[in-house]
Image (spheres, rainbow, N blue to C red):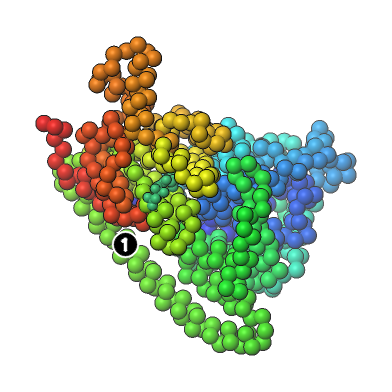
Amino acid sequence: MKMNILDDLRINAGASLSLFASITALLLQSHNTSISLAVKVHSEFYSRPLVRLLRTYLYVEMALNGSSEEKEQTASWLRWMHRHIHGSINEETRKELGMPDDVDHYGYIDELKAYIMQTLTWATISFQERFGKRLSTRAKDTIVLEYTCAGLRLGVPQSMLTTTYDDFVVSFNHRLDRLDAGYELTGTVVHNVEASVISAKKHWITGLLVRAALMVGHSLLPERVKSKYQLNILKFRTARAIQWALCTSLWLVYPFLMLIPLRGMICLLLVLEPQLRPILRSSLQAIHCMDILHDKPVLPKSKGPEKASGLPIYLSWLASGKQRPSFLQMVLVKTLQAQLQSDSWINTVRVWLTYPFTIAETCAEYAIHSANDTVRVWRSQIQESSLFHSDGEVSMPLHIGIIMDGNRRYARQLGQHVLVGHAKGAATASKVLEWWLKYLPNTVSYASPMHPRYLTCWAFSSENFERAEEERDGLFAMMAAEFKSLAFTSLVHLFRVRVRFIGGERHRFPLELLETMEMVEEITSTYDGLFLQIAVGYGGRQEVVSAVQNLVSQGKEITERNIGMETYCAQRSIPPVNLIIRTSERRTSGFFLWDTQAAELHFIDKLWPQLTEMDWLHALESFSTREIRGGR
Ligand SMILES: CC(C)=CCC/C(C)=C/CC/C(C)=C/COP(=O)(O)OP(=O)(O)O
């Protein structure tokens, strides 16, 4: 079976940045004295390093694997939290940290954020390369892009970040050159980092883990930095032998290590260190309270349950995630749950007596899910191979239009608020984007002249303005997060996807949403690989009226040909739609009223949030089997 292009890119940057690589990033960050200083004055790192470690895990997990809204909220929270980080540097501190004479101020400026993103990139790639499989250039580019996108989200200018691995190496070395030229890394900085990591009050297992992490993290530093980091823990020859042994064992257990994703690592820390539990709860709450349209924290509308069924709600966050939780993650969550339930001696006895059964149940649950997943993957591979690997030319649509319908009915079926349905719908929309890209290279490499180079999604119709204010405002906020997410999605940059918005009635949208749409169009404006159009405030009749009005204002004749040249697609040199996919209803509701004369229709009897990868493949297959005569 041919490997899919996304298989090569399926690198969980979160998991790679486990305990060990995060120490590498931390050491690299303290190589920059401005960061060291900011950390010393404004963070709890030196007094409570585990708290900082936990928070860093949480931010990285949210930024890489959260929902679009969570990603945006995390960036918003980080901007909010760091806004006071600046100050002047006195003589004593300058000497202690070996800072250059001409630097008298520090602040959390864009240059530092860009450097922090690069330290995470370096740590993730070198960890993966050293202990995992060799990475292809495309896979390395993806990791670079993941962190670049996180940096863009934080507001770092595009010019300070890179989009390919080769450019990253040049830029990172350039930054290290500048650091080397500016000052000599002092023993105090190195010692501070090491001492605080080691001396924190913690469980003995955490103690061992952080020592191991320091040794392994040090070995992943770039050679030019490594020699400057004379860690006390590595002073003796025996310690260096232990370091070597640790690295070799890590190389051996790497596949198992990858079974604990970052959310699992957070869970492990909470199992070992109970004092960190309130930190996770308050950090999650703070992130979820960010108003992303206005970039400031707001009190939640309803206070919401602090605890679900007697247990803190962060537990369900730990058990969820973009990917299905791994087995080890599930076991760790169950262990934490058992610890939390052991609040009296009777409960302790009850919980720990039933613990083996709970784990057995987890095993069974995991086995069933894995079997289901395997069957699902096989089915889509069979479907894919019958579609793309068949002899002869495969006919593919050049332009696909999608009508996403059924979000509210989905929510109502579950007894949930309509916005929950829209959130599920938004998640399905980003999956469709992934499937579109995932099945592209095959269609291209299987010599089909027609491949879905253009995709249009109808996100908000002219009629949708008439919905209840609460739903409409919720949708605006959700669309802002989703659209922003597009600009900060590595796949969009890797496949050079140009994003554009079509539709009218712009004055009815909030300014923040309009600015977001402008920003997304601007960031992708130079791309020409693929084209994604999002229809907002769109109505078929309104499109035709606006085309006619354009002709009238230009004094042109109203002819079929002239109207055809003024439609949204024609104005952007995009071909008319060949295939319309709609969920839950069997009508087109005026979607591309003018440009769908020759379009094939494919209706799916499911609500939009229920759409699966098989449905997508099936739609392509259904198109490929039709005889398209174009009226001849
Ligand atoms: C990136 C991208 C394209 C994001 C999309 C954002 C998103 C999910 C918009 C909502 C679309 C919408 C109004 C669906 C219609 O369901 P409905 O409310 O009409 O449901 P119903 O038919 O059950 O009433």
In the visual, does 226 lie left or right of 394? right
Front-lying residue, 242 or 221: 221
* Quadrant in the picture for residue 609: bottom left
Quadrant placement of the C terminus:
top left
In the structure shown, which secondary structural element does the residue marked by tag 1 occupy? helix
- Residue 27 lies left or right of residue 555; in this view the side is right
Which residue is pictured at 67% across the width and 87% down the height?
A: 345
Q: Position of residue 588 (x, y in %)?
A: 29, 41
Residue at image coords 57%, 46%: 72
**At which x and y percent is residue 278?**
69, 65
**Residue farthest toward the top in the current orientation of the protein:** 555
Is 482 situated above or below 596? below
- For badge 1, the amino acid type reads Arg
Q: Could you tell me which residue is drawn at 26 percent across and 47 percent down?
A: 586
Residue 1 in sight: no
- Whole-percent x, y for residue 38 in the image: 76, 46
Position of residue 18 in the picture relative to residue 299 (left or right): left
The residue tagged 1 is: 376
User: Split into 4 quadrants, where in the image is the N terminus?
Assistant: bottom left
Task: Identify which residue, 329 or 340, lies in the foreground.
Answer: 340
Q: Quadrant of residue 492?
A: top left
Observer able to see residue 542: yes
User: Residue 384: image x %, image y %?
Assistant: 26, 52
Determine crowd level at label 1: few under 14, some 14-19, many 20+ residues with C-alpha closer than 10 A. Answer: some
Image point 29% across, 33% down: which residue? Answer: 593
